[in-house]
Image: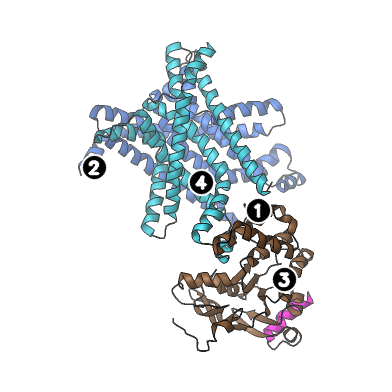
Chain colours: A cyan, B brown, C blue
Amino acid sequence: MITQLLTSIAQGVGLTLYVTGASLLFGGLIGLVLVGAARSPIAIIRAAATLYINVVRVIPPITWLFLIYFGLPQYALRLSTLQAAIIGFSIIASAFMAEIYRSGLLSIPDGQREAAHALGLSPFTTVGHIITPQAFRVALPAIATYGIGLLKDSALASTIGVREITYYAQQSAKQTHEGLLSFVVAGALYIIISLVVALVARRVDLKLRRKIGVL
Amino acid sequence: MGLSFGTKAPPTALSGEVEVSGLGKKYGVIEVLKDVNISMAEGEVVSVIGPSGAGKSTFLRCLNYLEKPSSGTIAIGGARVVAGEKLPDKASLDHLRRVTGMVFQSFNLFPHLTVMENITLPQRKVLGSSKEQAEEVANQLLKRVGLPEKAKAYPARLSGGQQQRIAIARALALSPKVMLFDEPTSALDPEIGLEVLAVMRDLADEGMTMLVVTHEMHFARDVSERIMVMGNGGVLEIGPSRQVMSEPQNDRTRQFLKAVLDR
Amino acid sequence: MDLITQWLGWMPNLTPGLVISLQLTGLALLIGFPFGLLLAVMAEAKFKPFQWISFAFVEIGRGLPALVLLYLLYFSLPDAGITLTSLTTAIIALSWNTGAYASEYFRAGLAAVPLGQKEAAITSGLSGWTGFRIVILPQALRISTPPLAGLAVLVFQGSALAFVIAVPELMSKAFEIGSITFEYLSVYTLTAVIYGTLTLIFLGLVRILELRLGRHLLRN
């Protein structure tokens, strides 16, 4: 029974990873733009970025998904369930990633900018060679933690019909009447994926820290 | 504020020379630096001393525009900048930073780069040197500061004294005409500070023009030709080192020296 | 203008849903926070089985997506002969989830109380439970309060999940209106505005709370 359930529910792993990965990627890129905008010298751009980040964060993810999946087609914008899920989670991830980048940037001591300044490095070189590499290393654990959070949030995509892990678990529960077992299997899959992500992130983090000798 | 300055010597004579006049800085209505004047000959070493809050660091950081002065003129090694409301044009600022090298109290080495990369990156980005050229310069400088074996190490693996010596090498790699030291030994244990002071002493002997904010009275007296004493954002007095130390003219200088030397 | 009229027209239908969302949130916090403190204390206990039990509850509560935890209870409890209403099931799932996260904040709070405080308590004759209760715990709670308040805001957002097991809360009511009027965009925008506004109000309260708690650390 359990192997049957496992093979059936594991079919959803692909889309779970796809939704999570794509949203983290797009969200991460939009987040970069946002954090840049939030530091813009132009006040209105700064305000817009801050507003966006706050609006995104105060609305529950499931409301975002429904708004996009059910709401947008009203204006002839037909989206597949998968597209709607990725758009929704990318929007959500962008706000959180922007916050993660921001705290990464804040963790770089002023002395680093000052030293780059005093050496006459251009702003471009300073950001590219001095600030970003350090900020990324600091932010890596937070990005991994957020990625695991997003993985768990991606279960919500099942509510609009994306065939990921939770979707298949729900199907199995209804068809086989093995409700407990179906969701135990689904839960185990999420935990295994989370553990793998956490382990990899930890190793990369340790490696980076060992490399520069802070461990 | 277009304070132009009358006594302009020909550019060649300005090389390695510092001419600061009327330097001031305000935060709102608070004047943290007022009317600081100093001129230094090429190869001269001047120590800046005074109680904390006197404006010593602010003065030094205004010289390479880490902080924006509100008024005055800065001429260093051929670069010349007039302070005012607006930031000077980029070319003059770049020039000013090219001719000055700075060493910070907290070293500020780039922790994600090796010692070698710390010294070569600015050369390659600012001077456009090739990797080979930059590394050759770096190797020579590492020998000069006594750390040739640390090229591949990351800063976190080095002691504070070693980090500061590397920071000096990094600044020297851009061949500055004047070196600015902002309390280079304050973050170090006294005996570790000595190794940094030794490197600075060598540098002075080789004829580098140096402006050193310091609490090290021995260095101020023995290595620098002149001492500038600051208090409350202004210059209390300036004169030959031994003279300032033994017969200070200003009351507040006397109080300060008494407090420091009695400790 | 039209939009406002439309939204006002829907409010009588949405309000009962919002009330249930708030009830669900309130109960999940009321049960979840003490449960979290219990899990935190058990995690620090010397008796190993307590640690294991705590570990299992925390890891399941945090490691599973909240939605999966909700489905797990919803589909399995009836099989075990336990029939509960959807609302009760949602309260249990959300409390478990809340407790698991809260336990981490309580543990961090307990760990942040300096060892010297414990030693001072013991040398002042306040050992064991009394010392824990009147010296350690109040300080730990003060440290844990801001993150717990932040968690409370997330629990409110999480209450929207109960929709999937047909608890008649705000999202369900919105869905109902949407499937009758087909004005999905409008009704979900209104729902988002309601969630957003309340969340902002909660966050504002959290901020005030943080400032008040931090006051004893300020000099003036």
Give residue C4's mark: 2
Q: How far apart in space, not on screen, are marks 2 and 3 (Cα)?
A: 74 Å
Left or right placement of residue C13 versus residue A117 in this view: left
Amino acid residing under circle 2: Ile
Amino acid residing under circle 4: Ile
| Vertical order, C163 against A7 (above or below) | below
Q: Does residue C205 appear in the picture of this structure?
A: yes
Give the labeled residue for mark 3.
Answer: B200
Q: Mark 3 and mark 4 in contact? Answer it, CB < 8 Å.
A: no
Dot 1: what SS? Answer: loop
Chain letter for the residue marked with disc 2 in the picture: C
Q: Position of residue C219 (x, y in %)?
A: 59, 61
Dot 4: what SS? Answer: helix
Give residue A100's mark: 4
- Are dots 3 and 1 on a single chain? yes
Give the labeled residue for mark 1.
Answer: B114
Q: How far apart in space, not on screen, are marks 3 and 1 (Cα)?
A: 23 Å
Q: Which residues are magenta?
A: B249-262
Chain letter for the residue marked with disc 4 in the picture: A
Q: Is residue C88 rendered magenta in the image?
A: no
Q: How far apart in space, not on screen, are marks 4 and 2 (Cα)?
A: 37 Å
Q: Mark 3 and mark 1 in contact? Answer it, CB < 8 Å.
A: no
- Are dots 1 and 4 on a single chain? no
